[in-house]
Image: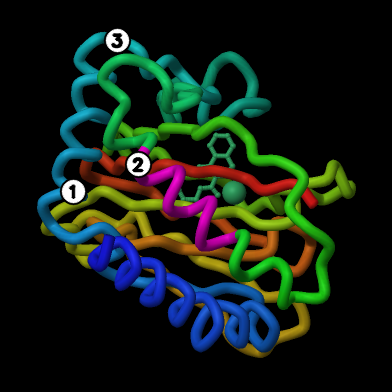
Amino acid sequence: PFLQHLADMKLEQLALEHIVPALRDHGFFYVDSFLGDEVGRMVLGQVKQMQCSGLLNDGQLAGRGLGVSKRHIRGDKIAWVSGTERGAEAINFLLKLIDKLVSLCIGRLGKNVIRERSKAMVACYPGNGAGYVKHVDNPNADGRCVTCIYYLNKNWNAKEHGGILRIFPEGKSYVADIEPLFDRLLLFWSDRRNPHEVQPSFATRYAITVWYFD
Ligand SMILES: O=C(O)CNC(=O)c1n[nH]c2ccccc2c1=O
Ligand SMILES: [Fe+2]
């Protein structure tokens, strides 16, 4: 169908003209309005529904290792989604689109083909000041090569809500502060090239992450 062909061309253009050069030169890239408002809202709705159904369980205990005396603030809550679950149709549509986009890029990034993808990790930071300490997603070559994060936060104002993803690109003199804005898709190399942190969040902060293995 003509519209599908048009969408495929746009995706290929995004991959070749923007993502591939950016991943090569800077190691990360984000695109806004990835799905468009209507479909983005459907994904957000399905994530909120998961939260209401209690599917988002506690991720990590924030402030761990600070001894039992410290009040433990709850960190991110997460759920692993394959996309085939009932009520995850819009999430599945997103995952298939990201799959297509990444496969368009990988061939041209000197990498071999993408072997597989993780399930989608739906994460919610509760907005109690919890964040995620500076880390590398894949420090020890576990096979993950690209991290993709789709943000779902409408009217996010980092000055008030915090929650910035700060990337410290290895060997670069700058840091990249990325706001977790609604319908924004971020891609970055999962290895030691991209240490990153989630700064304390003071509003509920939703994201869907997938990792690609080469
Ligand atoms: O949400 C973000 O902007 C970045 N988020 C991360 O870097 C991040 N990285 N690794 C994780 C592992 C388990 C649970 C949550 C996470 C997590 O939010
Ligand atoms: Fe991470």
Q: Residue furthest right?
A: 140
Residue 111, image x, y percentages: 82, 67
* Residue type at tag 2: Phe
Q: Nearer the viewer, residue 120 or 128?
A: 120
> In the rendered structure, which amino acid carries the disc numbered 3?
Gly
Query: Callout 2: helix, strand or loop?
Result: helix
Spatial distance from mark 2 to mark 1, Cα to Cα?
A: 9 Å
Q: Which of 13 and 175 is in front in this view?
A: 13
Residue that badge 2 annotates:
93
Q: Earlier in the sequence, mark 1 or mark 3?
A: 1
- Kindly identify the residue that appears in the image at 34 percent across and 68 percent down: 5
Q: Name the residue under label 3.
A: 54
Q: Give the range drawn in magenta.
A: 93-102
Q: Which amino acid does label 1 sit on?
A: Val
Residue 82 higher or lower than 1, as above or below: above
Q: Which of marks 2 and 1 is nearer the N terminus?
A: 1
Q: Main secondary structure of the magenta part?
A: helix
Q: Residue at x 20, y 49 (%)?
A: 40
Identify the residue under disc 1.
39
Is residue 186 shown above or below 94? Answer: below
